[in-house]
Every structure is written in structure tokens, then in C-alpha cells.
Amino acid sequence: MSCNDSEKSHVRTPTEDAILATVTAGIDVGNSSTKAVVLYDGQMTYAIVPSLEESQTLAERALLQALAEADLSLNDVQSIVASGAGGKEIALAGNHYLSSISCAVKGIAYLHPSVRTVIDVGAEGFCVANCDESGMLLEYEQHQKCGSGGGMFLEVAAEILDVELEEMGALSLQAEEEIQITATCAVFAESEIVSLIHKGKSRADILKAVHNSIGGRIVSLLSSVDFKRDVACIGGVARNAGMVNAIQSLANVDILVPEVPEIVVALGAAIGAKRKGGELK
Amino acid sequence: MITAGVDIGSTAAKGILLGKNGEKPFILAQAINRTGGDSVETARKVMDDLLKQADIALEEVGYIVSTGYGRIMVPFANKNVTEISCHAKGSHFYFPGVRTILDMGGQDCKAIRCNAKGKVTNFVMNDKCAAGAGRYMEVVAKLTDKPLEDLGELSLQYEGEPSSISAVCVLFARGEILALRRKNVNKNNIIAGASDSLVKRAVPLLKRVGVEPEFVVSGGIAKNIGVIKRVEDAVGQKARIATEPQIVGALGAALFAQQLLERKR
């Protein structure tokens, strides 16, 4: 898929953005967590809250938290854009919405302009996108038909293996034996994991197999967009060292992970809001 | 002449001990156990159950056919036959007029067409995704905190409209069900919505092979009256269900065993 012209016409370089110097916010209402980013005077604050309520409430809570971090109030914000699976029709953003993919590339270009391909792994699926240094979206593909390529699959595995989500990646790096999970469906993989446990396979080996299974699906999509260096991985799953390692070794490329990988889409939305704000004034 | 059929499914292991009275085969013993982590052990246990019930020794069983997902893991079987052939064979034994079978197992869903002799002429299956299989209902039972056996009845007792639940992926459905539970939505409406989405995945398979009467539903899910009603509505035909639909595959295997033993003699 390639992006349309309206997308291109909104593109400005990060330097131009800085000149506009308004207080803007981006809210990314995801399936698993909701993220808000506030941009002001070239500075940034953020908040992450679990997506356990309806979208309007979540969006407001995340934004107020991010504003509190910046010592600002809602009145100070000149422009807000929402994004993410639950980001359409967010009243707080005046229904201004940008797709996760376009926000992901805007956000990554702001943080790391050298990135040409970004992998965004969310709770329910992932997408890969090529962009230029100004954050213009060039091409993208997504895997959202089923949960076999998202963070939820990792959660299922963590639960069966009784491992903390935060620790599973590191543990998978201690694997000694190469084993495979053949099922694509996460629910079937669950039974496969149980039988691997019965066979006496170590948790580290099973976890590595889980990461490789998801990683394989990511890399096959990555190859389909003809990825270019630098390659970045964003989204909460990017914090998982086992996942990043699996993608790195399967695609044979170094993966860059931003300091706070889960807020890149919200940051991109805040940048999008800045453009919107700039145009309005 | 005694033969046995052992069906090692993904979720349950089934066994049938078959005798013959003149020309007519009859069931000597039947067993249904949960499939454990070790398929060989699971198979042994089913066979032991059968032998104990009939009070005979393994040596007295003339021929054993294994079938199902774990059919190659049955060390004492003389031969293995695919579950597709076995379900057709078993269904044909119960309903000689059968032409179309929907076999809904724990980990796959198959639509099978057979001829007047119970021989398979065509089939399609979904074994890649849990959204059309029994495992989905287990997930629903767990998330609604209801016994699996009750889901069928409960799915017919909803108020107003059933909840709308994704038919795309069980993981997505799981997230949606959790959200509905947080909103305190009537559990029966959730179960009804999940049953709708399960059937939405099974029916296209049937349409691909074409539904010609008689139409039989076999496999563990055939015990779920809510799913059966929905399938019947969707294909516009009444479904025939065996007294114990879960053992149809094992019965088919035991019937094959009988044929093979006779041929040997």
C-alpha cells in the first residue's frame, strides 16, 4: 500500500515543527493501553494508562496525567489529535484523528530521523512502514487479521509459563535448545506450549520458540515492504528484548528501539496536532 | 470377533470396542477421556478403560484402528485411518442416509461429503484457527465462568440481542468478552454472541462442499444445542445427531477394523 497525497501535503520537517512552538497533544487509544504525549517549548511529557474503560474516559485520563507532568492544564493545549484503534471520534480531540501508521512514522522521524523502516507491534497485531527523514509515509503493510502477531500472543504464553510479561524476553535469551511452535493460531499454540512443558522443555527454550514464531511473521511482512536501514521497533512489545532479538536474527538487521517505545504513535499524533494548530493560526 | 477404534483427538481421546452379532456390529464398550500431554499414555488409558469395561484382555481384540490428531501415537494399533474417513464411516453406521457431515472437534472443523456407502467424496477443513473449533467454546466457558456443558442451553436464553463478538480470532474475541464482562453484560448474551461467531466460521465450510440431506453433525460440539440450532438455521436443514456424537470417529475406526479383520481371514 502506498500513502495518498493528502498525507504528503501535511509533511514538514522536525525543524519547521519546532518553529511553530505551540502546546499540542497526541493521544493513542490502543487495545491494551492508552498513551498521551504533550509537546511544549520543544519539550515532551507523556502518560500511559491501561485501556480498561471506554475510550473518551481513557483519553481524558491519559491526557490530564501527561499535562500534570508538564505543569499545564487542558486550557493551555492549543491542538489535540487522537490515534490508535480506539482513537476515532475522541471528543477531546475534536474528532481529529490520524492513523497509527502515519503517526508512527511522524513520531519516529522526530526522535530518530535516520529510521527508514518502522515496525509497530501492538496488542492485537503489527504493521511495518517505510518513511523518509521528514516522517513521510512511503509504504506500509499490516497484519491484523488475527492475534497471532501481537502482544496478546505473548501475554497468553507468559500466563501459561507463569512468567512476568516484563521478564519473558530476557528469559528467552537464555534458551539453549532450538524448538519450534508450528501452530499459527495463538489458541492452538497454547496447547502446543502445554505439550512442550509436558515433554520437559525448559521455559527459556519454549519462550524463544514463541518469540521466533511471532518474529517470523513480522519478518515476512518486513521483507514484503523491502525494508531499509535504520530499522526501528516501537510499541510496548519493543521493550521485550527477546522479541527484538528474534526480529534482528531472523531479518539479519540491527533494530533500533526508542527510549520509550510505546509512546511513539502518541508523539506522532502530537506532531500532527502541531501542524494542525499551525495551520489554524 | 472383537475390534477396537481409538480416536486421539486434540482435546478428548475416545475409544470403542465393537462386537458383531451375525451381520450387525454392536458396541461392547465406549470411553471418553481428556487427551493428556503424552499421547501414547492417553491411548493406553483409553484402551485399558475399554478392556476393563468389557472384562477382556488386549489379546482378545482382533484388530485395532487408530484415528484422530494423535493416530500415529497409538503403539498397539494395527493400522491408522484419517478421522475424515472414520467420521463418515461412523455417521453412516448411525444414519445410513447421510450425505453431509459437519465434524466439529476441539481443534478443527470439517465439512465432509460422502456417498451412499459412507465413503468420503469431498471435504474441506479449518485446522489453522481456533475461531471455528471447540477450543473457542472452552475459552468462552472459562471467561463466563459457566460449565462447558451448559453453554448450549444458555446461548438460547439471551435477552434482546446477542452481544456482537468478533468471529475473526479467538484472541480478539477474548478481549471483547472481557470488556463485555467489565460492563456487566448478561452472560447469556455473551455466550449467544460467541456461539453466533463460532457458527459464522463453520457454515462457510459446509457451503463449500454443499449440504445434501441427510445432514449429520458429529464431534464434541454436536452436544451443544445452541450451536446445532444456529447451524440448522444457517443451512436451512435439520441436523441428525448420534446419541453420543463424540465417539463417531472412534466408532468409524472400529468399523474399519472389523472390515480389515474380515478381509484378513
Image (spheres, grey):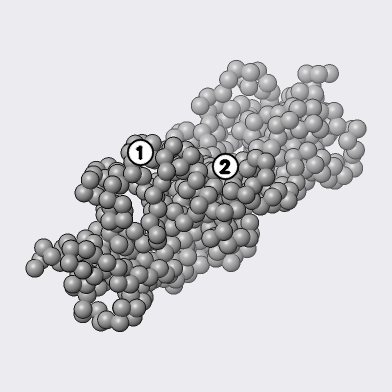
Q: Amino acid at mark 2?
A: Ser
Chain ID at mark 1: B
Q: Quadrant of the C terminus of chain A?
A: top right
Q: Nearer the viewer, mark 2 or mark 1?
A: 1
Q: Nearer the viewer, residue B98 or A37?
A: B98
Q: Nearer the viewer, residue B197 or A212?
A: B197
Task: Report whether B245 appears left or right of A156.
Answer: left
Vertical order, B35 against B60 (above or below) = above
Ranked by sequence position, the earlier of labels 2 and 1 is: 2
Host chain of mark 2: B
Q: Say which quarter of the image contains residue A169.
A: bottom right
Q: Nearer the viewer, residue A88 or A137?
A: A88
State the count of labels. 2
Q: Could you say where residue A52 lies in the image, as x and y percent from the top left?
A: 73, 49
Which residue does the image show at 35% across and 70% down from the upper left? Answer: B30
x 21%, y 68%: residue: B20
Q: Is residue B251 left or right of residue B132?
A: left
Q: Which mark is residue B166?
A: 2
Disc 1 is placed on an element classified as loop
The quadrant holding residue B262 is: bottom left
Residue A134 pos. (x, y %): 64, 27
Residue A241 x %, y %: 57, 55
Mark 1: few/some/many CA within 10 Å (<14, 14-19, 20+): many
CB of mark 2 within 8 Å of CB of mark 1? no
Residue B211's tag is 1
Determine which quarter of the picture holds residue B264: bottom left
Query: Which structural element holds mark 2?
Result: loop
Q: Residue at x 80, y 24 (%)?
A: A277
Residue A173 point in image, percent of width and height: 52, 61
Q: Disc 1 residue type?
A: Val
